[in-house]
Image (cartoon, grey):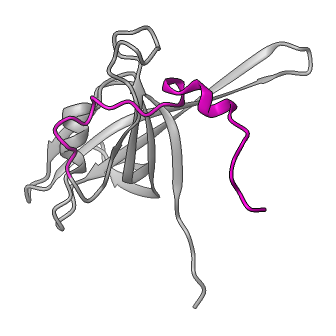
Amino acid sequence: MSRSLNKAMLIGNLGSDPEIRSTTTGTRVASFSLATSRSWTGQNGEKQEKTEWHKCVVWNRKSGGGLVDVVEKYVKKGDRLYVEGEIEYRQWQDKENQTRYTTEINVRDMVMLGGSRGSGGGDSESGGGSRRAPSAAKAPAGAGAAGGDFEDFPAALEDTDDDLPF
């Protein structure tokens, strides 16, 4: 039997605050829309941009994961996220008994890349920095306090003297 791979990796911004709900069995789920954009210069030299919206769903796993708790506590509209998960296509019946189709990213891992919250797009006012939210563990108490962006160490980007033996 051959192997297959279903993996999506996205970096984008949240369009609205995440929606947190519980299923009838008590499993918590978070959902949010993530916007990714690309830009290019057209044949006439005019700059163009296209934004795609991705529906993302985060489930708390039975094995004790707490990613929904992290989303609920730390993720807000406008935040920049890296999400990794599987693409899932579903069909369902609406109230008028019409068949509807949905494409979702079933998020397994997430990294908070710093937000534009309250700072007009920069990270300096928002407590920014890069914060990783592992899928199998809860975020530490000071998850938003530590910085980790390269902007904190500009010389690190310019340093070309590496000690590689080849």
Residue at horizontal 40%, vertical 42%?
A: 111
**Residue 96 in view, yes or no:** yes
- Residue 93 location in percent, x, y? 32, 51
Residue 102 in view here: no
Q: Residue at x 37, y 24 (%)?
A: 128
Task: From the viewer's side, name the closer residue of 8 and 113.
Answer: 113
Q: Quadrant of residue 52?
A: top right
Residue furthest to the right in view is 43
Tag count: 0
Please report the residue visible at 32 percent of the width from the left and 21 percent of the height from the top: 127
Spot the residue most to the bottom.
1
Q: Position of residue 27 (x, y in %)?
A: 14, 56
Which quarter shows the C terminus?
A: bottom right
- Give the main secondary structure of the magenta stretch: loop
137, 58: nearer the viewer: 137
> From which residue to which does the magenta span run?
138-166
Q: x%, y% of residue 101?
A: 44, 50
Q: Quadrant of residue 112?
A: top left
Q: Tell whether position 96 is magenta.
A: no
Q: Which quadrant, please, contains the N terminus?
A: bottom right
Q: Is residue 74 left or right of residue 37?
A: left
Indicate left or right for 149 with 19 as reference.
right
Residue at image location 43% in from the left, 50% down from the top = 105
Q: Is residue 163 magenta?
A: yes
